[in-house]
Amino acid sequence: MPAAPRVSPSAVFTPDAWAPFQARSWWKGPLLVLHCWGVIAAAVAIGVWQPILIPLCVMVIGARQLGLAILMHEAAHGALVPNLKLNDFLGQWLCAVPIGASLTAYRPYHLAHHRFAQQPEDPDLMLAAPFPVSRASLRRKMIRDLTAQTFFKQRVLLPLAALRGRSGANEDAHAYDAIVTGRSVAAFLIWNAGLLVVLSLLGVWWAFFALWLLPMATWFPLVTRLRNIAEHACVEGSADDPFRAARTTRARWCERAFIAPYWVNFHAEHHLFMHVPCWNLPRLHRAVRATEPGQRMEVANGYVEVLRQAASRPA
């Protein structure tokens, strides 16, 4: 099994220049988790106060549900806090379980993705391999996401198939198997039942369905798909050059708010040096791009550019 090509930090930075990038923090990771839940709570409150704003709130909450998945990903790398037990507690119970994921199952899967990135053994390869597709094909995928068809297949049909001992080979089955949507069904149901009880006691039981479940069924699958496409699809030379193993997408404020929270758009840097905490990735991006090999990185000017490239195959 050929592993993905690697580059050592010493090949790019001096020890003094590299040291700040790998430093862990006791407060930044927990603050991000608190921020994520604070944004979700504020959006729920605004949606309850002004129901006309529910569509906007659905987009904000769905993006922060992706934010919980991103912070679970940070925990998978041990980057939320220096203490591994606290790191795993935050990553599992405040990030993974609420969206139906499992940190314990996700970590070995994701580390295999890093070890074999863009190689035949990469468990995520099939997420990028089909691209580019036609505009019509991409449009159909996005419509399935926004109309909850993807959610229903991943959260209902695939778990039922798994219980019957069946499996699928398509992208939606992969998303379930990859713990992107999760196997911790019991914990997920208990956690969400608790949330429903809390909202019911506050007299807004309907907010659970309109402002938590609806974003999870629509906007969350869509932005998860956009993130997957942007990270690895249509990057020439990604299997051979560590500086081109993934794409970085320059995200405007609105893209960070609705599509790519918590610096997930800096994916080329993450694959170069996967133990760098997410809050250090913008600075790492500038430092790597200032070097000669860093000029080889794939950098897109926004998600619209990525989608145009991903949907460039003639119909």
Image (cartoon, rainbow, N blue to C red):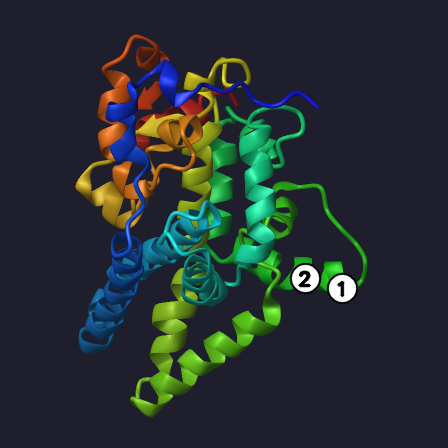
Task: Specify the amino acid type for callout 1.
Answer: Leu
Query: Label 2, on which residue?
Result: 159
Query: Label 1, on which residue?
Result: 163
Question: Where is residue 125 drawn, in percent x and y?
Answer: 59, 31
Q: Rounded to the nearest whole Å, what is the CA distance between mark 2 and mark 1? A: 6 Å
Is mark 2 in CB contact (under 8 Å) with mark 1?
Answer: yes
**Residue drawn at (30%, 59%) of the image:** 30
Question: Where is residue 97 drawn, in percent x and y?
Answer: 49, 65
**In the picture shown, does residue 248 fall above or below 177?**
above
**In the picture shown, does residue 66 fall above or below 52?**
above
**Residue drawn at (66%, 20%) of the image:** 2
Q: Quadrant of residue 68?
A: bottom left
Pick whichever, 294 or 133, lies toward us.
294
Question: Where is residue 140 drawn, in percent x and y?
Answer: 50, 41
**Residue drawn at (38%, 76%) of the image:** 208
**Residue drawn at (28%, 31%) of the image:** 19
- How many residues crowd around disc 1 within 10 Å: few (fewer than 14), some, or many (20 or more)? few
Task: Specify the amino acid type for callout 2.
Answer: Pro
Question: Where is residue 288 drawn, in percent x and y?
Answer: 29, 20
- How many residues crowd around disc 2 within 10 Å: few (fewer than 14), some, or many (20 or more)? many
